Every structure is written in structure tokens, then in C-alpha cells.
Image: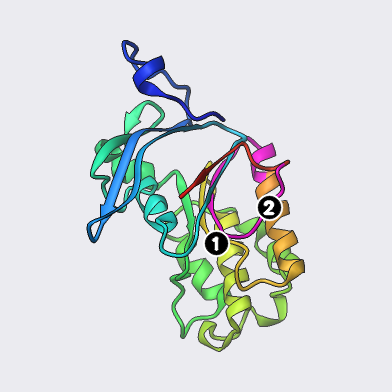
Amino acid sequence: MTFMNYNDDLKNEKISVSTDNLNAKNLSLARGGRELFTNLNFIVKPGDLLLIQGENGSGKTSLLKVIAGLIEPDNGSLFWSSKNIISQRQSFHKNIACLSHNPGFKGDLTILENIKFESSLRKMSMEKLEDSLKRFQLTEFSKIPFRFLSVGQQKRAAIVRMCLIDVKLWLMDEPLSNLDATGQSLVIDLINNHAKNSGLCVLASHHEISHDLISNRINL
């Protein structure tokens, strides 16, 4: 994956991309009178990991929300499979899985109940559920109401759900936070396997990530 200078390299060219490429052109966003990022250009291809780094409040989460199509940038455009995501918001959302600070699970439901409910709304690889729960050491907690789980267990449950969703693009906000060393290692393995299977990943983190995994990075 490379950053691209559209002004110099693509001035007279139409953006040409293959299926499942994520392309950003001159993205800019300001909040509260402060510029978070200006004229960002990047391409994420199958097998790529884009790492967004920065301190708290630097705009990492805001950039992920722009990529997810949840907020519109002040300037610039984002393309998925050569089409602006604004013009295909609903279909684009079917192609992404997000890991955010708020897992979005219903507190009175168990992990199993939450995941089974979501599986009725979107395509998920439920045959992997049992193994995924075991891998993240959640089997014995899978029938406990979500609100009674520790922060780390809730984070693991959200990661299990994300890896079951049958999509190409993962958007992950601080995926290593609230996890012990074992949990962090499991997440890194998941990301690596996703990339090896031609998945795309955009990851925002203040943790150091192995250079072997990263295709490129943005520092905010």
C-alpha cells in the first residue's frame, strides 16, 4: 500500500482501482476550529494494513468514522471499488466490520445471545463461533449477561464478533487496549490471518505494531 500524491501523479487521470480497494483522495477534517487532518491520500489493497497513529484527541477515531462513512469529510472523497462511499453508503456498510470503544452489545444479553441476534441481521460465519470463543478464553463466560463481564472480556467478545462477520474490510479503533499480552497476541494473529486471506485492515492505535504487519502508516 502506498500514499499517493493525486495532484502530481493523477492530475489528468481517472481513479482506477480493482475490486475491494479503499481509496482516499485529499481527505480533510476540522473539529472545534482545529484541523485534524488535511489532504490525506492513501490506497488500501487486499492484504494491506494501514496503521493510524497519534495521541488521544489527534483525530484517529474521527478518521476511522470518515472511512466508515459515519461522518463526511470537510473536503476530499473516499472510494470503495471505484465508487464514492457516499453514493453507496448502505452497500458499503455491508462490506465492513468495525471494532470501536463501545462494543454495542446489549448488557442484559449474553455473548451468545448478542452474537446470534446480530447473525440474524448480517452474514456471519457462525460455524467458527465455538472455536473463536475458546480461542479468546470466553467459553465459560459466554452465557453470562454482558454487563457482568470485565472490560477485557467485553473487548474480547467484540473481537470475536468482528472476526465472525464475513467481510473484507476491518476498521479497528485501539484493538489492543484493555487486553493482556495474550489477548494482544491473539488480535495480532487475527489481523495477520485476515491480511493473508486478502482482507483489508485500517487500524488506529497508540500501541506499537510490528513493522512486518504494516503496509503503511498515517501519523496524526
Please tell me which of labels 1 and 2 falls first in the chain. Answer: 1
Q: What residue did someone put label 2 on?
A: 190
For the residue labelled by badge 1, is the local secondary structure a helix, a strand or a loop? loop
Around disc 1, counting alpha carbons within 10 Å, would you say few (fewer than 14), some (14 to 19), or many (20 or more)?
some
Residue 120, quarter of the rendered image? bottom left
Residue 213, magenta (yes or no): no
Residue type at numbered disc 1: Glu
Q: Is residue 157 above or below residue 10?
A: below
In front of the other: 86 or 35: 35
Q: Is residue 217 left or right of residue 87?
A: right
Give coordinates of residue 101: x percent, y percent: 47, 68
Residue sitting at x 70%, y 65%: 130
Dot 2 lies on which element?
Answer: helix
Out of 27 and 54, give the one closest to the viewer: 54
- Residue 126 or residue 192, whichever sits in front: 192
Label 1 and label 2: CA atoms lie apart by 14 Å
The residue lying at 29 percent from left, 48 percent from top is 29
Residue 28, numbered label: none
Label 2 Cα neighbours within 10 Å, binned few <14 / some 14-19 / many ≥20: some
* Percent position of residue 93, x then y: 38, 47
Instruction: Name the quadrant of the N terminus.
Output: top right
Asked if residue 196 lies in the magenta stretch, the reply is yes
From which residue to which does the magenta span run?
194-211
State the residue position of label 1: 174
